[in-house]
Image (cartoon, grey):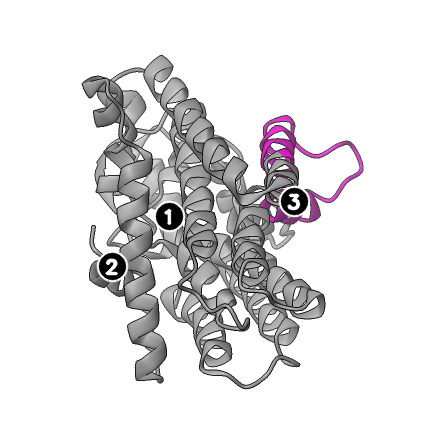
């Protein structure tokens, strides 16, 4: 994957030519450093470790790191900014290897998932290998970076555990789900923004704003993936449409459907309360969900988080990077229709 295709994958359009050139150059450097970070003297380890790197991806986290760095005097071309972006992307890729094992996935980014191509054991160990490489880079970025990443990793793991266990009795399943998204998705995107800002010498107040943007944006982005899994016919989310539905994974639209009380929605509630291995039932549930109020409720929640992301940066200087961040928030809304 090249830096040009990375920007195309993101789908963001830059109004400022200078910023676009800077970001393109930065993503090129990040991509080269990412490729170097997954190399190994062992040919098999190298092949498995670079598997998801080569499969592509939107590189949202490095992009956000580079944009956040634009608010500082040091700019986005420092080694620390670039390597912190690599750390966040390596961490993200490592979680994908682990997630595919937990989800028993067969496809990732349009290719056979690593756990299916090799084995669960290989996929888990490869994720661990990438975490190790990220930690090695962090050691050169200083103790504060190590601490920030450790706390982020704690949130990632906590979110995964809470998702696996489910909400406690008396806890609203939707509130639980949204808090899980904040930990599993929002936390790492928030750290990507914080790293870019900190290593570019940004003041603490602006760092806090950019970190908050990253978390709110991350939640909105994950909800948009939930919506795409139902509404898309093309697999825009990187998975076969309806995958979560087939496996009985209760994403936000499904949770809203389950909370419904309208008698007309009884059949939908019955279907989405369980995995749907039967093709006819799966198609029926997908059709009902696509025309349901639950899907619109999920879109409304996504809009709220996108609006919240925009609000966190309302007080920042009106730089080209500020406009680019707003464009990212807009993109989340547009991609899910």
Secondary structure of the residue carrying tag 1 is helix
Name the residue rendered at 63%, 49% in the picture. Answer: 178
**Quarter assignment of residue 320:** bottom left
Name the residue rendered at 59%, 83% in the picture. Answer: 317
- The earlier-in-sequence mark between 2 and 1 is 2
- The earlier-in-sequence mark between 1 and 3 is 3
Label 1 and label 3: CA atoms lie apart by 46 Å
Q: Quadrant of the C terminus?
A: bottom left
Residue that badge 3 annotates: 144
Q: Is residue 185 visible?
A: yes
Secondary structure of the residue carrying tag 3 is helix
* Number of disc labels: 3
Q: How far from the left and from the top, in percent, is residue 1?
A: 20, 50
Label 3 and label 2: CA atoms lie apart by 29 Å
Secondary structure of the residue carrying tag 2 is helix
Task: Please say whether residue 38 is one of the residues in the magenta stretch.
Answer: no
Which disc number belongs to residue 3?
Answer: 2
Residue that badge 1 annotates: 286
- The earlier-in-sequence mark between 3 and 2 is 2
Magenta stretch: give its range: 154-182
Name the residue rendered at 29%, 66% in the picture. Answer: 24
CA neighbours of label 2 inside 10 A, class few (<14), some (14 to 19), many (20+): some
Compare residues 32 and 187 and report the one nearer the observer: 32
């Amino acid at each position: 994957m090249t830096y040009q295709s990375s920007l195309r994958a993101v789908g963001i359009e830059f109004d400022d030519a200078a910023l676009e050139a800077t970001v393109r150059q930065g993503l090129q450097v990040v991509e080269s450093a990412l490729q170097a970070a997954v190399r190994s003297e062992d040919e098999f380890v190298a092949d498995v470790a670079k598997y998801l790197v080569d499969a592509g991806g939107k590189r949202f986290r490095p992009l956000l790191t580079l944009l956040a760095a634009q608010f500082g005097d040091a700019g986005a071309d420092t080694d620390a900014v670039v390597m912190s972006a690599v750390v966040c992307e390596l961490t993200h890729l490592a979680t994908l290897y682990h997630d595919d094992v937990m989800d028993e996935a067969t496809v990732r980014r349009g290719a056979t998932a690593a756990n299916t191509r090799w084995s669960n054991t290989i996929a888990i160990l490869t994720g661990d290998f990438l975490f190790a490489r990220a930690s090695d880079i962090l050691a050169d970025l200083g103790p504060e970076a190590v601490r920030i990443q450790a706390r982020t990793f704690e949130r990632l793991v906590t979110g995964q555990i809470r998702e696996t266990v489910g909400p406690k009795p008396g806890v609203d399943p939707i509130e639980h789900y949204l808090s899980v998204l904040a930990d599993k998705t929002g936390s790492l995107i928030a750290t990507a923004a914080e790293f870019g800002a900190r290593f570019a010498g940004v003041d603490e107040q602006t760092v806090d704003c950019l970190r908050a943007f990253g978390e709110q944006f991350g939640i909105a982005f994950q909800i948009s993936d939930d919506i795409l899994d139902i509404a898309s016919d093309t697999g825009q989310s990187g998975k076969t449409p309806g995958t979560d539905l087939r496996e009985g994974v209760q994403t936000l639209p499904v949770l809203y459907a389950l909370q419904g009380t309208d008698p007309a929605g009884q059949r939908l509630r019955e279907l989405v309360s369980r995995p749907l291995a039967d093709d006819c039932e799966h198609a029926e549930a997908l059709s009902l969900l696509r025309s349901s109020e639950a899907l619109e409720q999920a879109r409304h929640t996504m809009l709220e988080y996108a609006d919240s992301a925009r609000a966190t940066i309302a007080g920042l200087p009106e730089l080209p990077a500020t406009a680019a961040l707003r464009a990212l928030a807009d993109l989340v809304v547009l991609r899910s229709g």
